[in-house]
Image (spheres, rainbow, N blue to C red):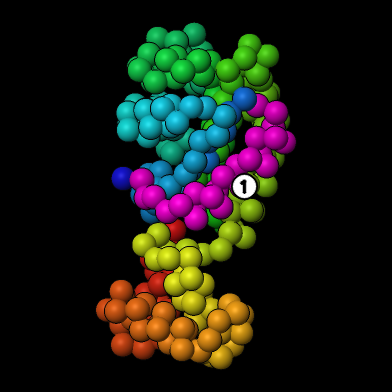
Amino acid sequence: MLQRNPQREKDLALVAERALRASQMDSIGLYVFDDNRNPAEGVILGMPEAFSRAYEVTGMRIDPVLRHLRDTGAPCSTVTQLGDRWTRSELYRRVSGRFGLTGFAALPLYREDDLAGILYLGATTDENARRLSLEGVCTMSPHATRISTRLLRLPDRHPDLTDRQNDVARLAAEGLSNRDIADALGTGEAAVRKHLKALNRHFGTANRTAMAAAWRQTLR
């Protein structure tokens, strides 16, 4: 089940937009995996919202390219994996073909040694469809490397907390005092204490140290 956090989706969209411009492909999808290598959160740019919904509800379950990347951790595309069978595939018939997506590359995103997500670079034009060959996919791979690095730099966020609660939790986890947190966020210590109380209540913890540990364990 995909998680929905507007601020996190905004963060991912900013990363994806840079990669879309750099790649000069027609569309892009950026998804972060959970511990079981299932897409947990992400965005699609350059395609209608209806396509995003159709892919997330139906397409992911039947996507042979996604399955291959999860199994091998290697970059691939509709051309390298399916060739002429692509337009006869269930994914094409039920999702991609309906919205004019003629093919896509799938590039792995890594966090150190762990497969952390997938970068899709999609084609809706014949010119970009020709870039989905093995050689073209290899040429696109540096975009995934750059995105992997940028994902590591994104602010850590718990999907069920507000932006300010995440900021307070992050700074508390870094060892800052209430006064230092208040100064960093441009607020008062009373507001910080209120957020810490709410965070302890959310995580069922009794102090900031336990709360910070619980917050770290549930980050996405």
Q: Is residue 8 visible?
A: yes
| Residue holding disc 1 | 15
Local SS, label 1: helix
Where 174 falls versus 85 (above or below)?
A: below
Residue range in magenta is 2-25
**For residue 108: magenta?**
no
The residue depicted at 32 percent of the width and 33 percent of the height is: 57
Which quarter shows the C terminus? bottom left
Q: Residues within 10 Å of mark 1 (few under 14, many from 20)?
A: some
The residue depicted at 46 percent of the width and 76 percent of the height is: 169
Residue 62 occupies quadrant:
top left
Where 170 falls versus 85 (above or below)?
A: below
Query: How many numbered tags mark residues here?
Result: 1
Nearer to us in this view, 73 or 201: 201
Q: Main secondary structure of the magenta part?
A: helix
Left or right, residue 40 beside residue 168: left
**For residue 14: magenta?**
yes
Where 177 falls versus 87 (above or below)?
A: below
Where 141 falls versus 197 (above or below)?
A: above
Identify the amino acid type marked 1: Val
Nearer to us in this view, 153 or 190: 190
Left or right, residue 160 beside residue 132: left
Find residue 67 and report its horizontal and vertical position in percent.
Answer: 40, 32
Find residue 73 and report its horizontal and vertical position in percent.
Answer: 50, 40
The residue depicted at 48 percent of the width and 71 percent of the height is: 164
The residue depicted at 50 percent of the width and 15 percent of the height is: 100
Residue lying farthest to the left in this orientation = 204
Left or right, residue 126 beside residue 98: right
Find residue 81 and report its horizontal and vertical position in percent.
Answer: 49, 21
Which quarter shows the N terminus? top left
Q: Is residue 130 visible?
A: no
Residue 85 occupies quadrant:
top left
